[in-house]
Amino acid sequence: MKKIKLFWGIYYPVVLSFLSFLYSVSLWFSGYQLEGIFVGIWVPSILGLSICIRQRRNDYFRALYAQKKLNNRKK
């Protein structure tokens, strides 16, 4: 169960983007071309948002680690 949570925590944007891509292709070939294009735009949006969130999270943890390290040196 722990491995599944770890996998999902890391790769959820890729999985969601792939599902969005499949949905877009299915719409396109079902005759709903405009809807397929609209849903296809979600793929880069999901990936871009996940990169933004991951970058902010990493910056936060780096700052927190640097602050802890600084506080340990003062003691």
Image (cartoon, grey):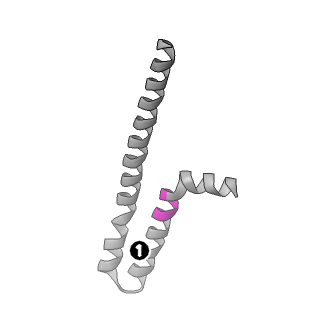
Q: What residue sits right under mark 1 in the picture?
A: 24
Query: How far from the left and from the top, in percent, is residue 54?
Result: 43, 45
Query: How far from the left and from the top, in percent, is residue 59?
Result: 40, 35
Q: Residue at x 52, y 58 (%)?
A: 12
Q: Residue at x 35, y 59 (%)?
A: 45
Is 16 within the magenta? yes
Is 30 within the magenta? no
On the rendered structure, is 44 left or right of 16? Answer: left
For this rendering, which residue is in front, 5 or 74?
74
Q: Residue at x 44, y 38 (%)?
A: 58
Which SS does the magenta portion mostly show? helix
On the rendered structure, is 66 left or right of 42? Answer: right
Q: Residue at x 70, y 58 (%)?
A: 1
Q: Is residue 69 above or below residue 64?
A: above
Query: How far from the left and from the top, in percent, is residue 34?
Result: 29, 78
Q: Mark 1: which amino acid? A: Ser
The span picked out in magenta is 13-17
Q: Is residue 37 above or below residue 56?
A: below
On the rendered structure, is 11 left or right of 64? Answer: right
Query: How far from the left and from the top, in percent, is residue 71?
Result: 46, 19
| SS for dot 1 | helix
Give the crowd class for mark 1: few <14, some 14-19, many >=20 residues within 10 Å.
many
For this rendering, which residue is in front, 21 or 56?
56
